[in-house]
Image (cartoon, rainbow, N blue to C red):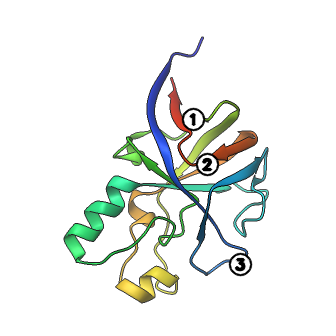
Amino acid sequence: MNIEQNDGKIVAISISCKRGTIKYNVEEVKIVENYGIEGDAHAGDWHKQISMLSLESIEKFNAESGHDVKPGEFSENITTEGISVLTSIPVGSLLRIGKDVVLEITQHGKEEKEGCPIFKKVGKCILPREGIFARVLKGGIVRIGDPIKILK
């Protein structure tokens, strides 16, 4: 039996129609099992269907760098609040978002690419260091404000 702990919430949802572009924010999305976010260029049959970054990481970056990067500009799909260090969630862990969506954490960080839009704009990107990636085990609709629970 899983013990659920309420850990955070969604503060932004971001998608893009083309890879290599900054994502734009939306109020809600349909997350499709074994695929990712409907309409997002990074969805597909692979292990990085959804990317997540914490608002705490973005705010820390802005405070230290003097920039004003907004949620989605680091190319994350879901910006969280309340889970300050997403990379502390072990690979293989399950997250529930809202009532229905279940994600499996598949990777911490990624290789940083100098060609990504935010890297070109501010000289670095924190998603490769502080972001996490997941695949969709169960789909559904998610909205800004939905709770995120780590399933133990």
Give the left or right position of residue 120, taking residue 135 as reference. left
For mark 1, what is the residue? 95
User: 10 Å neighbourhood of mark 1: few (<14), some, or many (≥20)?
Assistant: many
**How far separated are the C-alphas under marks 2 and 1?**
9 Å
Q: Residue at x 56, y 49 (%)?
A: 144
From this viewpoint, which residue is outermost toward the top? 1
Of label 1 and label 3, which has the lower sequence position?
3
Q: Which residue does the numbered mark 3 point to in the structure image?
A: 18
Q: Residue sitting at 51 percent across and 23 percent down?
A: 152
Q: Looking at the figure, which quarter contains the N terminus?
A: top right
From the viewer's side, name the closer residue of 44 and 58: 58
Q: Is residue 90 left or right of residue 146?
A: left
Q: Residues within 10 Å of mark 2 (few under 14, many from 20)?
A: many
Q: Are marks 2 and 1 in contact (CB under 8 Å)?
A: yes
**Residue 24: horizontal and vertical position, in percent?**
60, 71
The quadrant holding residue 15 is bottom right
Q: Is residue 93 left or right of residue 26?
A: left
- Asked which secondary structure carries label 3, the reply is loop
Disc 2 residue type?
Ala
Q: Residue at x 52, y 36 (%)?
A: 148
Give the amino acid at mark 1: Leu
Question: Residue 81 versus residue 52: which sits nearer the camera?
Answer: 81
Which picture quadrant has residue 46? Answer: bottom right
Relative to 107, 138 lies left or right? right
Q: Which mark is residue 134?
A: 2
Which circle's residue, 2 or 3, is located before the other in the chain?
3
66 versus 51 height, above or below? below
Give the percent coordinates (x, y) of residue 42: 69, 66
Disc 2 vs disc 1: which is toward the camera?
1
x, y percentage for residue 85?
35, 46
